[in-house]
Image (tube, grey):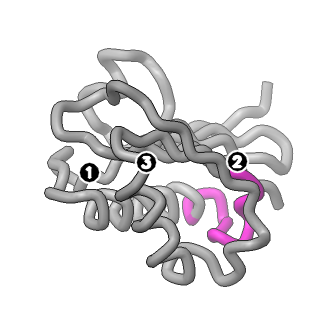
Amino acid sequence: KNKKAEGFGMPWEEIYGYSQAIKKGNTVWISGQLGHNEKGELPEGMDAQMKQTYVNIKELLSRFGMSMENVVEEVIYTMDMTTAFDARKNFKADFYADPKMVASTMVGVTGLALPGQLVEIKIVATE
């Protein structure tokens, strides 16, 4: 057992039935994060959504006493590979001190959870 869960209190957490992040042992698994604000609203455009997604990831990590330095893997799901690749490439130093120390996979998908959602990022972090 000894798992700790964290969430944002978004309605879909209860509707779908999941936690935004789970820690067990020295590992944190972060569910696919969206670029929503505290009201659950998505900004326009890939750059804005991706930046906010990483803000949300940083917030969840901080609740476990972790930072982006603890991230070992990310999986980026996107509706548009070209704009997502450019956003991740252009802002990588904003997200990670050393982007080459993260295993990263990007997957093009035909749909995501919310209307207007362009990107979703899943994270694994360790102490």
Location of residue 24 (image quadrant): top right
**In front: 123, or 88?**
88
Q: Mark 2 and mark 3 in contact? Answer it, CB < 8 Å.
A: no
Residue 124 falls left or right of residue 43 = right
At horizontal 61% and vertical 76% (from top left) the residue drawn is 96
Residue that extends furthest to the front in the rendered view of this protein: 82
* Upstream in sequence: badge 2 or badge 3: 3
Give the amino acid at mark 2.
Val
Q: Which residue is mark 1?
A: 36
At horizontal 48% and vertical 40% (from top left) the residue drawn is 77
Q: Which residue is mark 2?
A: 124
- Between marks 2 and 3 in the image, the one whose residue lies nearer the viewer: 3
Split into 4 quadrants, where in the image is the N terminus? top right
**38 is higher (above) or lower (below) than 115:** below
**106 is higher (above) or lower (below) than 43:** above
Residue 71 falls inside the magenta stretch: yes
Mark number displayed over residue 114: none
Split into 4 quadrants, where in the image is the C terminus? bottom right
**In front: 31, or 62?**
31
Give the amino acid at mark 1.
His
Residue 105 falls left or right of residue 55 = right
Q: Mark 3 and mark 1 in contact? Answer it, CB < 8 Å.
A: no
At horizontal 47% and vertical 36% (from top left) the residue drawn is 108
Residue 82 at x, y = what percent?
Answer: 40, 54
Mark number displayed over residue 81: 3
Q: Residues under labels 2 and 3: Cα distance?
A: 22 Å
What segment carries the magenta color?
Answer: 62-73
Residue 55 falls inside the magenta stretch: no
* Upstream in sequence: badge 3 or badge 1: 1
